[in-house]
Image: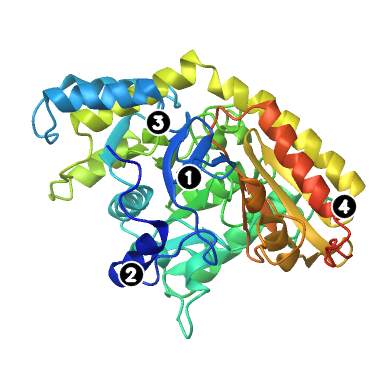
Amino acid sequence: MTAEIFPKVKTIDLRKKHIGPSCKVFFSHDPIKIVRAKGQYMYDENGVRYLDCINNVAHVGHSHPMVVKAGAEQMELLNTNSRFLHDNLVQYAQRLQATLPEKLSVCYFVNSGSEANDLALRLAWEYTGHKDVITLDNAYHGHVSSLINISPYKFHQLANAEQSKSVHVALSPDLYRGNYRQDHPDPATAYADDVNNLIQKAHEKGHKVAAFIAESLQSCGGQVIPPAGYFQKVAQHVHRAGGLFIADEVQVGFGRVGTHFWAFQLQGEDFVPDIVTMGKPIGNGHPMSCVVTTREVAEAFKNSGMEYFNTFGGNPVSCAIGLAVLDVIEKEDLQGNALRVGGYLTRLLEQQKEKHPLVGDIRGRGLFVGAELVRDRVKLTPATAEAQDIIYNSKLCFPRLKEQHILLSADGPHRNVLKFKPPMCFSEEDADMVVEKIDQILTGVNPCSQLAIVI
């Protein structure tokens, strides 16, 4: 198989001709053509190697041989739908459930994080008989219509868009930039009270809440780490109102946070959501995802009278790949690596915060880390342009990260948070390299650069 069929310029022209214009590419002024990848590295058509700091989909590393082998071997034998009995399906469900609290025991396999979250809403609506959903500001839960409605990260971008009357947006539990910050005596209660206020206002209008949904750690919202105890307090309010708690682990599950396999477990053993959704890393790039819930919720969904069937969800190939991913996480101690290397990366970035006033906050867990850039540490003025200039800017004299073959992205409502969510095989040497380059850029090493990150 050849790595490249067309010259890069023709690939760009064909993409413009045949691919929807709203489907964007990274580094649109000079996009990268990737033809292969291995571990935490990606390679372009000329063999140039890039360090991947952003790809939380290739969870155990790009093209991991155990995952590739598992998928290929099963594909040679059989791939069919889940209406036929197959041991891969039940074995994988059993293995997956063993990583979760006991009451989360029933699995529905689907094909993407969006499908998973859409199904989670259906489960909540059916179980509660209610319709309204509470979501967090700056949240992103997927691209299908039901999820755009509950994703402020997306619907805030739509001109003249009206928020659905059945959707209520709670404050993001951001301890750096939010309404209640690190100096607040009890931010968990304060943010949870905001959710309770939304519930009461919904009741006053004759509405009833079916679910509260939250990413266990907000990703697109800017690597937000909710205060300990927040989910427990929210769950109390939501359950009292007859609703369910949905934990979206699509971005942050499968050991990424280091100390735990699931990010919702950071809140403590006394918190167990009613529904958990997962995606992205589950198949290491293979399209698969899952919804896990309680027996009670699953029985209510069945009693609706409508059969649930997903053509590709839980097929033997997907389940073989899912099993291989779990095997690699365990055999290569990737959760432990996330804890060790993530802690090391965070310490390096904290040193940059001490050195450079532009770095306002460092936050994260394991290999899920954000560095928020601000022009003023008191006013917290977002350093949006500076964040982009660190990632790439070919017009500047001193090469930025992209020109030095390091792939990083920025996100958050102001696009000023540098996001680190690399493959879990990321090493301390990789962390040293990327932080060294960031330091050089922030310092303005090259005297011809007029930017020199002026503060």
Q: Residue at x 75, y 36 (%)?
A: 346
Q: Label 1: which residue?
A: 46
**Amino acid at pointer 4:** Thr
Residue 453: which quarter of the image?
bottom right
Give the Cα distance between marks 1 and 3.
19 Å
Q: Residues within 10 Å of mark 3 (few under 14, many from 20)?
A: some
Give the Cα distance between marks 2 and 4.
40 Å
Q: Residues within 10 Å of mark 2 (few under 14, many from 20)?
A: few
Which is more N-terminal, label 3 or label 4?
A: 3
**Amino acid at pointer 3:** Ser
Indicate left or right for 94 with 399 as reference: left
Which is more N-terminal, label 4 or label 2?
A: 2
**Amino acid at pointer 1:** Asn
Can residue 173 be seen in the rendering of this structure? yes
Give the Cα distance between marks 4 and 3.
36 Å
Q: Position of residue 63 (x, y in %)?
A: 40, 31
Q: Name the secondary structure under disc 4.
A: helix
Q: Label 2: which residue?
A: 20
Which is more N-terminal, label 1 or label 4?
A: 1
Q: Label 3: which residue?
A: 63
